[in-house]
């Protein structure tokens, strides 16, 4: 159930280039509604500037400890102000929002493919899959080594492969290059990242593998009311914030 949650900020620290981890103390009852792949809308300030909340994907939930972890990248005024919040402050979030990743109970091996700020929502998914005994392989991509993060966390789930455009870490190239170079086999894929990455994955595996892609898009309301985050699909225009952000392989139509 969607709700406004007033959370206490426990930690807000840099973990990679312009990328921060925010740890919040939250209501355990509310966290029970958070599925892998959903996001929250974070209110930046008590004032009207900036006016709009910022959508941030959920990295991890811990119901027992009442802990919610978000990872975000500083890209403008709103996220810059968010990065300046201190321990003990109250953070106003609204969620959970969106449609998350479906967990395929019959899959024996899955691959998680993350690029940039598309990496965070894959961890909670991988954690739940690993708990079910599924073999999890993670492929993470970035422009350079400074853009990679959470390698140790994903390493607790299974094998981790990296790709960087400049070759400073792992395979030189893109995540699709790393999958081929390492000859990774899998039953089902889950991916989140920039649209060019998702397009390449979709073209490569649609009709061959089962899979789900989580799209990043600029949002305003986050609940489907403003129609500001529309994306083309084979069934017409859909709202990323409400109908997504997760879509099946082959569902999206790319420009």
Image (cartoon, rainbow, N blue to C red):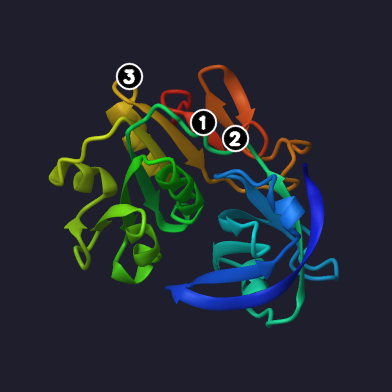
* Mark 1: secondary structure: strand
In the rendered image, the quadrant that contains the C terminus is: top left
- Per the image, the residue denoted by label 2 is 244
Distance, label 3 to label 1, CA atoms, is 14 Å
Q: Residue at x 44, y 46 (%)?
A: 131
User: Does residue 235 lie above or below 28 as drawn?
Assistant: above
- Per the image, the residue denoted by label 3 is 207
In the rendered image, the quadrant that contains the N terminus is: top right
Q: Residues within 10 Å of mark 3 (few under 14, many from 20)?
A: few
Q: Residue at x 60, y 67 (%)?
A: 76
* Mark 3: secondary structure: loop
Distance, label 2 to label 3, CA atoms, is 20 Å
Q: Position of residue 237 (x, y in %)?
A: 61, 25
Q: Position of residue 75 (x, y in %)?
A: 55, 66
241 left or right of 216 in image: right
Residue 91 visible in the snapshot: yes
Q: Position of residue 233 (x, y in %)?
A: 53, 24
Pointer 2 and pointer 3: residues touching (CB < 8 Å)?
no
* Mark 2: secondary structure: loop
Pointer 1 and pointer 2: residues touching (CB < 8 Å)?
yes
Residue 54 in which image quadrant: bottom right
Closer to the camera, 40 or 238? 40
Distance, label 1 to label 2, CA atoms, is 6 Å
Q: Residues within 10 Å of mark 2 (few under 14, many from 20)?
A: many
Q: Position of residue 56 (x, y in %)?
A: 61, 56
- Per the image, the residue denoted by label 1 is 247
Q: Residue at x 61, y 77 (%)?
A: 11
């Amino acid at each position: 159930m969607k709700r406004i949650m007033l959370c206490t900020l426990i930690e807000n620290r840099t973990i990679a280039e312009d990328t921060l981890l925010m740890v919040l103390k939250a209501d355990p009852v509310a966290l029970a509604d958070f599925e892998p792949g959903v996001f929250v809308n974070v209110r930046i300030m008590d004032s009207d500037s900036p006016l709009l909340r910022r959508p941030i994907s959920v990295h991890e939930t811990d119901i027992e400890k009442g802990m919610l972890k978000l990872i975000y990248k500083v890209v403008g005024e709103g996220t810059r102000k968010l990065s300046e919040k201190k321990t003990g402050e109250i953070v106003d979030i609204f969620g959970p929002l969106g449609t998350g990743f479906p967990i395929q109970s019959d899959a024996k091996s899955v691959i998680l493919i993350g690029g940039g700020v598309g990496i965070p929502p894959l961890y909670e998914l991988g954690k739940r899959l690993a708990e079910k005994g599924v073999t999890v392989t993670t492929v993470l991509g970035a422009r350079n080594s400074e853009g990679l993060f959470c390698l140790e966390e994903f390493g607790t789930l299974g094998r981790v492969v990296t790709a960087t455009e400049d070759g400073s870490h792992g395979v030189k190239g893109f995540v699709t290059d790393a999958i081929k170079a390492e000859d990774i086999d899998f039953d089902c894929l889950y991916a989140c990242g920039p649209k060019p990455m998702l397009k390449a994955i979709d073209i490569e595996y649609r009709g061959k593998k089962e899979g789900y892609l989580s799209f990043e898009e600029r949002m305003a309301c986050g609940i489907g009311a403003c129609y500001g985050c529309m994306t083309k699909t084979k069934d017409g225009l859909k709202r990323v914030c409400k109908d997504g952000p997760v879509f099946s392989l082959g569902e999206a139509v790319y420009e």
